[in-house]
Image (tube, helix red, strand yellow):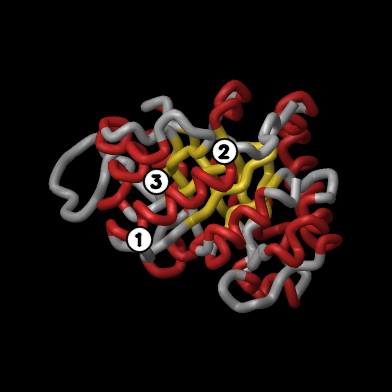
Amino acid sequence: MRKNIVAGNWKMNNDLKATRKLVKQIRKSIKKAELDNTRVIVAPTFVNLATAVKRAKKSKLEVAAQNMHQATNGAFTGEISADMLKSVGVKTVILGHSERRAYFGETDAILAEKVDAALSNKLEVIFCFGEELADRKTGKEETVVGSQIEKALFHLEADAYKKIVLAYEPVWAIGTGETASPEQAQDMHAFIRKTLADKYGNEVADSVSILYGGSVKPANAKEIFSKPDVDGGLIGGAALNSKDFYAIVSAF
């Protein structure tokens, strides 16, 4: 049975003090929650990962990284390797976020290399993808999403999907206040699962958690998460407030 997942991507927010405080608040809020089939993850900035991991120990809270470089080591100033993440206790990494694609030029080919590097180091990958507003308006959303998945992931063997979580994020609904309707989210998630099934079979497709990432809030989380192919959310702004984040977790 695939897991429900609520993952908070903190992006470039929260200094050390704020990280300690928010981890403590989230850890406390979920301590007595019924989370038998739900994972709760937060992704702080790199410089606070070690602190977050330490503060989340022996709790239901997991800590992920927001990115990593595909190389093992070398002259890549400012970058972080899989080994570095593992050395501070991180076991999951977000790859392919739309902001990494848009602002830092990460292509499908680069992301395929990053996925390979993460998996070879036994890191779990939360792999992000999604269409721009122009793609949606011209009816190309499935073509774009299908291509992103195929180019970055379809070189993998079926067994690799035990360590992959997919996160569909319509770019037009990130930080804009716009949200895909629950029906739009379900339609795309069903398409994604079918795309996996066509390549790897139903067993793999049915085992992969697919998250929705696009302005999920306490007010809409329950309806979005109620859809059969939506297994949780990759949360941005609402993840920076412990009460809002817990309300989203509670939507399950």
Residue 55 visible? The answer is yes
In this rendering, position of residue 9 left or right of residue 74:
right
Q: Position of residue 133 (x, y in %)?
A: 66, 75
Q: SS at mark 3?
A: strand
- Chain-order first, disc 3 or disc 2: 2
Circles 3, 2 touching at the beta carbon (< 8 Å):
no
Q: Position of residue 226 (x, y in %)?
A: 83, 50
Q: What secondary structure is found at the residue carrying circle 1? A: helix
The amino acid sitting under disc 3 is: Ala
First in sequence: mark 3 vs mark 1: 1
The residue at the point 31 percent across, 37 percent down is: 85
Task: Specify which label sits upstream in the sequence, 2 or 1.
Answer: 1
Q: Residue 128: where, in percent of width, then height?
A: 56, 52
Residue ID for mark 3: 65
Q: Residues within 10 Å of mark 2 (few under 14, many from 20)?
A: few
Residue sitting nearer the eye, 84 or 238: 238
Circle count: 3
Do callouts 3 and 1 mark residues in contact (Cβ within 8 Å)?
no
- Which element is circle 2 on? loop
Which residue was labeled with disc 1? Answer: 18
Q: Residues within 10 Å of mark 3 (few under 14, many from 20)?
A: many
Tell me the quarter of the image containing the N terminus: top right
Kindly identify which numbered label has been placed on residue 46. Answer: none
Mark in front: 2 vs 1 = 2
Distance from Cα at disc 2 to Cα at disc 1: 20 Å
Choose mark 3 or mark 1, whichever is in front.
Answer: 1
Residue at which label 2 appears: 31
